[in-house]
Image: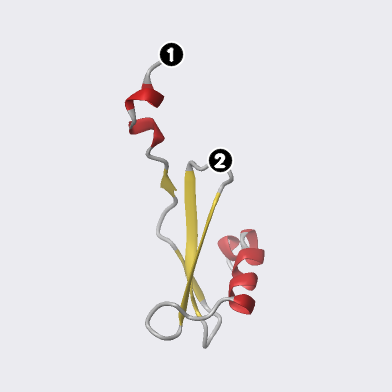
């Protein structure tokens, strides 16, 4: 298992044990955040083999793009 798999093994194992395939008949798409609402990550798991592929990159929040959140001192 690579470093991504070791870091997120609980999420991956839980998805394999409790989720049903929801993409192309035998893939499980699982996603999670960092807890602040500002980042997301995840993986696509082959339910037949247990192999997974992490999302290409973590996505950031759109909060910084909103005017109310980007003003300093307000």
Percent position (x, y) of residue 46? 49, 80
Q: Is residue 65 above or below residue 47?
A: above
Task: Name the residue that disc number 2 marks.
Answer: 36
Residue at (63, 58) in percent of width and height: 7
Quadrant containing the N terminus is: bottom right
Split into 4 quadrants, where in the image is the C terminus?
top left
In the image shown, does 23 or 4 lie closer to the viewer?
23
Ranked by sequence position, the earlier of labels 2 and 1 is 2
Read off the residue under disc 1. Answer: 74
Q: Which mark is residue 31?
A: none
Measured as percent of width and height from the top left, residue 32 is found at 54, 56
Q: Residue at x 56, y 81 (%)?
A: 50
Q: Residue furthest top?
A: 73
Residue 12 in the image: state x and y as whole percent.
59, 69
Distance Cα–Cα, label 2 vs label 1: 21 Å
Q: Residues within 10 Å of mark 2 (few under 14, many from 20)?
A: few
In this view, 5 is above or below 36:
below
Residue 35 location, quadrant: top right
Disc 1: CA contacts within 10 A as few (<14), some (14-19) or many (>=20): few
Displayed quadrant of residue 56: bottom left
Q: Nearer the viewer, mark 2 or mark 1?
A: 1
Q: How was the colour assigned to the protein in this rendering?
A: secondary structure
């Amino acid at each position: 298992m690579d470093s991504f798999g070791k870091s997120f093994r609980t999420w991956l194992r839980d998805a394999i044990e409790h989720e049903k395939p929801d993409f192309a008949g035998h893939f499980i798409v699982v996603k999670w955040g960092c807890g602040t609402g500002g980042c997301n990550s995840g993986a696509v798991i082959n339910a037949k083999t247990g192999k997974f592929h992490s999302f290409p990159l973590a996505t950031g929040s759109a909060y910084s793009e909103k005017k109310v959140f980007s003003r300093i001192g307000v």
